[in-house]
């Protein structure tokens, strides 16, 4: 999993480097996001729904008037309480495609990776979608959905009693700002 950790560090570095790039090239921009929502962990015997806060950033390139392509990351807070369903996690959006057909609302589709922060970290894949409604030319309110599945065999080595997959569904309301 050292390769996944390197990829996570590289994605974080990419987002930070985007601050300077977005200031110098008009076809590039940085986007930040703050949100809150519900995350459901759907593995037996655990079926918990918890409230989470999230913060993220991404670097995007305009592909004409209607399309943007980018990458970024979203960090989700730990949930109140203790247990397997309360762990914080990081979602890396390896590809985030945004389609804005009429200059108003936008649709985004995402694919990437997830890392759960535990005593023994878990890694997996994620998919997501969102509808963005613009509030101003540089801000938007977004309704986002994320699905993720992490491999628990990396977090609980040699424990045959554990479900090898840790599945999550999340819905959140997100405020986005472009720079």
Image (cartoon, helix red, strand yellow):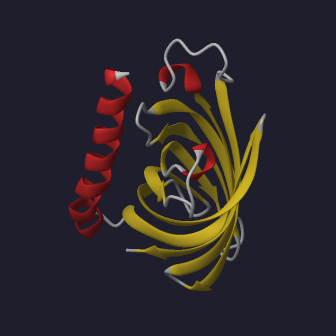
Quarter of the image containing the N terminus? top left
Q: Quadrant of residue 50?
A: bottom right
Quick check: 171 left or right of 114? right
Q: Residue at x 48, y 69 (%)?
A: 33
With respect to residue 106, does 58 lie above or below?
Answer: above
Q: Does residue 22 sit above or below 104 in this rendering?
A: above
In front: 56, or 41? 41
Which residue is more in the foreground, 152 or 101?
152
Most foreground residue, 107 or 7: 7
Q: Position of residue 157 (x, y in %)?
A: 49, 16
Dividing the image into 4 quarters, which one contains the C terminus? bottom left
Could you say where residue 119 lies in the image, as x and y percent from the top left?
40, 36
For residue 65, above or below residue 7: below
Q: Position of residue 72 (x, y in %)?
A: 43, 51
x and y percentages locating residue 19 in the rendered image: 26, 64
- Indicate whether 66 appears above or below 10: below
Residue drawn at (48%, 56%) of the image: 74
């Amino acid at each position: 999993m050292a390769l996944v950790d390197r990829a996570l560090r590289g994605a974080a570095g990419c987002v930070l480097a985007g601050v300077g790039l977005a200031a110098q090239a008009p076809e590039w921009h940085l986007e930040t996001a703050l949100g809150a929502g519900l995350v459901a962990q759907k593995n037996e015997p655990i079926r918990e729904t918890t409230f989470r806060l999230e913060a993220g950033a991404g670097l995007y390139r305009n592909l004409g008037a209607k399309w943007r392509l980018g990458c970024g990351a979203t960090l989700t807070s730990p949930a109140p309480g203790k247990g397997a369903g309360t762990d914080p996690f990081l979602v890396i959006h390896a590809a985030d495609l945004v389609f804005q057909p009429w200059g108003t609302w936008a649709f985004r589709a995402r694919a990437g990776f997830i890392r759960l922060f535990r005593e023994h970290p878990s890694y997996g894949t994620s998919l997501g979608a969102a509808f963005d409604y613009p509030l101003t030319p540089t801000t938007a309110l977004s309704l986002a959905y994320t699905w993720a599945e992490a491999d628990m065999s990396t977090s609980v080595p040699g424990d045959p009693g554990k479900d090898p997959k840790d599945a999550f569904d999340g819905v959140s309301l997100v405020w986005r700002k472009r720079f």
